[in-house]
Image: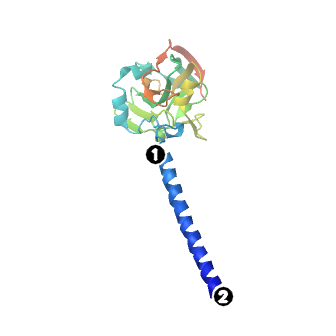
Amino acid sequence: METTTSNNVKKGITVFIFGLIFVAVSAVIYSKISNKISPQSGVGNREPVVCSSDFSAYTQLIQNSEHDVKLIPVRKSMYVEDGQFKNSQVIITKNETATSKVACGYLFVRAGTTDAGAVKSWEDVVIDPNGFGGHLNPLSAISVNDGDKYSEYLYALNKIQYWPTHNRQSINMADWAALLNVSETVPFTIAFNSENPTGFVDEVSIAYKCWDPETGKENNGCKLVVSQPIDQTSPLE
């Protein structure tokens, strides 16, 4: 009886030792295999191209004027009269590069009224690219500067919040950086929702970074250009 118990104990110890050896060897082999795989070699491990949500990152980006396209470069009179947007414009943007795409960016807006200065709480700038925009929500802006003569807004291009209509009953969000890559051209309708006839839009511009979808790396290959703007009168929505 004692001999049988002793044999069972020895067998148990032997199995336990072999188990430890198996685990140790497996760990060494796995470690060697893992070390051969570069953390940058997989698609999922690519470093994303980002545009930080702060004004300083924007000012640094626009130092490269090639990646700062102005949809409205100079002051344009815009307001609402008799339920119509006056002097609203349609600006066509064109992506001239197929191998490089827009990765991220910023939307900069400057608007106001001559006699009252900064944009009031009941007023807003309307920007609608191809049905994916509307009355911009200033509360979603990265930066807001309400001065004596005008208001300035800076938005993250991939997180544009807007009200579809002037009633402001619901808020939508759109990724305009992705939208600019969907088709070769994107029409932007721009207006100013203010009944003050001295209303104006000084500037609407897009600053952006580019990337190569094949490699996932940032580059300078993409380019947005603006076609001749078209003046129009459109109904207030």
Query: Which residue is nearer to you in this view: 173 or 123?
Result: 173
Residue drawn at x 62%, y 84% is: 3
Residue 23 is left or right of residue 55, and the answer is right
Query: Which residue is nearer to you in this view: 34 or 42?
Result: 34
Q: Quadrant of the N terminus?
A: bottom right
Q: Amino acid at mark 1?
A: Asn
Q: Is residue 172 visible?
A: yes
Which of the 4 image quadrants contains residue 63? top left
Which of the 4 image quadrants contains residue 56? top left
Determine contact: label 2, label 1, CB under 8 Å: no
Task: For label 1, count other residues whose C-alpha is less than 10 Å away and answer few (under 14), some (14-19) or many (20+).
Answer: few
Secondary-structure class at tag 2 = loop
Residue drawn at x 60%, y 41% is: 170
* Residue 192, x across and y down, in percent: 50, 27
* Residue 161, x across and y down, in percent: 53, 37
Secondary-structure class at tag 1 = helix
* Residue 146, x across and y down, in percent: 37, 36
Residue that label 2 marks: 1
Residue drawn at x 36%, y 35% is: 57
Q: Which mark is residue 221?
A: none
Which numbered disc flags the more N-terminal residue, 2 or 1?
A: 2
Residue that label 1 marks: 35
What is the C-alpha distance between the residues marked 2 and 1?
A: 52 Å
Query: Which residue is nearer to you in this view: 128 or 192?
Result: 128
Residue drawn at x 43%, y 20% is: 70
Q: Amino acid at mark 2?
A: Met
